[in-house]
Image: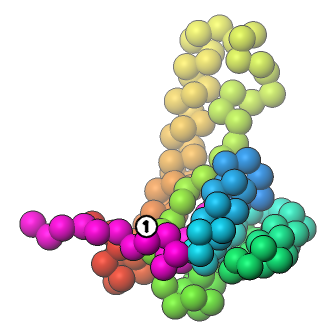
């Protein structure tokens, strides 16, 4: 069996969905600081532009693509633009998401309602986001021997 040895962060092109805030933003800044080229995806282009500027001002390399992960055409465009800009995708981070329980605070929901919402949201997110993200990124990553 072949041994998998990932590239150093500084040698990677990383696509990050949900990159305009929270964990996605922190991941993008950290990866760029370590030398990775980051492709930032979010619905919020204004925030993405500001983040790209900040990363570049700090000496990093970043590129923004307005993306709604629930739209297949946006996801295909994200993958195409990442490859067009940097020639490859080494890592794809599926970070975009929505609140699982909606507007109602979790502690106000009964267990059955909470479980139903959780199952419905996770199934919906998997179908519309995480699975397509992975399927779209896979060919580029596999070509580069980044996916096993």
Decide if residue 2 is in sight here. Answer: yes
As drawn, 26 above or below 109:
below
Residue 110, image quadrant: top right
Residue 139, image quadrant: bottom left
Decide if residue 139 is in sight here. Answer: no
At horizontal 79% and vertical 21% (from top left) the residue drawn is 104
As drawn, 83 above or below 64:
below
State the residue in front, 28 or 110.
Answer: 28
At horizontal 56% and vertical 33% (from top left) the residue drawn is 120
Residue 121, image quadrant: top right
| Circle 1 residues within 10 Å: few <14, some 14–19, many ≥20 | few
Screen quadrant of the N terminus: bottom left
As drawn, 121 above or below 147:
above
State the residue in front, 9 or 46.
Answer: 9
State the residue in front, 109 or 45.
Answer: 45
State the residue in front, 20 or 109.
Answer: 20
Q: Check disc 1 and report its element: helix, strand or loop.
A: helix
Where residue 27 appears, x then y in whole percent? 63, 57
Q: Indicate how the structure is coloured in the image.
A: rainbow
11 lies left or right of 18: left
At horizontal 60% and vertical 53% (from top left) the residue drawn is 95
36 falls in the magenta region: no
107 lies left or right of 133: right
Where residue 24 appears, x then y in whole percent? 67, 55
Where residue 116 appears, x then y in whole percent? 57, 22
14 falls in the magenta region: yes
Where residue 33 appears, x then y in whole percent? 66, 68
Count of numbered badges drawn on the protein:
1
Furthest residue to the left? 1
At horizontal 45% and vertical 63% (from top left) the residue drawn is 134
The residues colored magenta run 1-18
Name the residue tied to disc 1: 135
């Amino acid at each position: 069996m072949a041994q998998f040895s990932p590239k150093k962060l500084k040698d990677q092109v990383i696509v990050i969905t949900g990159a305009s805030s929270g964990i996605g933003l922190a991941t993008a800044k950290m990866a760029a600081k370590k030398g990775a080229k980051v492709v930032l995806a979010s619905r919020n282009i204004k925030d993405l532009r500001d983040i790209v500027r900040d990363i570049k001002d700090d000496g990093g390399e970043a590129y923004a693509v307005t993306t709604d992960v629930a739209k297949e055409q946006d996801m295909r465009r994200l993958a195409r633009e990442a490859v067009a800009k940097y020639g490859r995708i080494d890592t794809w981070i599926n970070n975009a998401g929505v609140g699982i329980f909606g507007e109602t605070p979790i502690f106000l929901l009964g267990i059955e309602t909470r479980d139903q919402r959780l199952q419905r949201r996770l199934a919906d997110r998997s179908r519309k986001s995480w699975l397509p993200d992975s399927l779209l990124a896979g060919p580029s990553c596999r070509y580069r021997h980044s996916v096993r």
